[in-house]
Image (cartoon, rainbow, N blue to C red):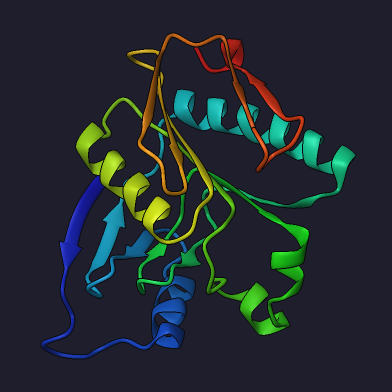
Amino acid sequence: MLLAKFDLKPIIDLTDDQFYQLCQVNPDVRFERDASGKILILSPYGAVTSNRNCEIGAELFIWNRQTQLGVCFGSSTGFRLPNGAVRAPSLTWMKKSQWNALTPEEQEKFPPVAPDFALELMSSFDMLEEVQTRMREYQENGVRLGWLIDRKTRRVEIYRADQSVEVLEDPVALSGEDVLPGFVLNLSIVW
């Protein structure tokens, strides 16, 4: 959930390195930056959402370890999207070739690329419209597959590159399609 949004541009226009440093010297604060350069402060997850996010992440990690097709990231990884925003989805994955194309410095900081897959797991205090806006931003910036999972309503929105959003009511499982080939998420660990 967004706690605060502030604009430092009247005072200073933070470079990517300065924003990264701001995040590093304030490790207890969840920062993001939107495409206009405004700094966002986000609240931490609650325990149930965090647990479900770990469960989903474990499934994705096990699949990825078996296939060795890419690299998985948790909610503390920021990605610098092509529009300039720095976002940290609940879970992300990118194919190995995309990861290996980054320099060691780019891998160490906020990778300047959209991941192939992004998941947002809504917490009980997230606003649906805010998360949908984030998902559209991921889609517009090159994320090939995105899942917005709302535990409260047992609803999933699927975002695909250059396609309309697909909405599923109370699905049993989700397919990773051609982005995460062979990956199937059993939603019993989420609901």
**What residue is rendered at 46% in x and 28% in y?**
49
Quadrant of the rendering where the N terminus is positioned: top left
**Position above or below: 17 against 112:** below
- 44 or 150: nearer the eye? 150
**Position above or below: 179 against 51:** below
What is the residue that sits farthest to the left in this orientation? Answer: 10
**What residue is rendered at 47% in x and 64% in y?**
27
| Residue 115 falls left or right of residue 137 | right
**What residue is rendered at 24% in x and 32% in y?**
128
Q: Quadrant of residue 15?
A: bottom left
- 123 or 25: nearer the eye? 123
**What residue is rendered at 88% in x and 38% in y?**
66
| Residue 121 falls left or right of residue 190 | left
Q: Quadrant of residue 104?
A: bottom right
Task: Give residue 75's position: percent from left, percent from top.
Answer: 52, 48
**Position above or below: 90 against 52:** below
Task: Give residue 89's position: percent from left, percent from top.
Answer: 46, 48
Task: Give residue 72's position: percent from left, percent from top.
Answer: 69, 49
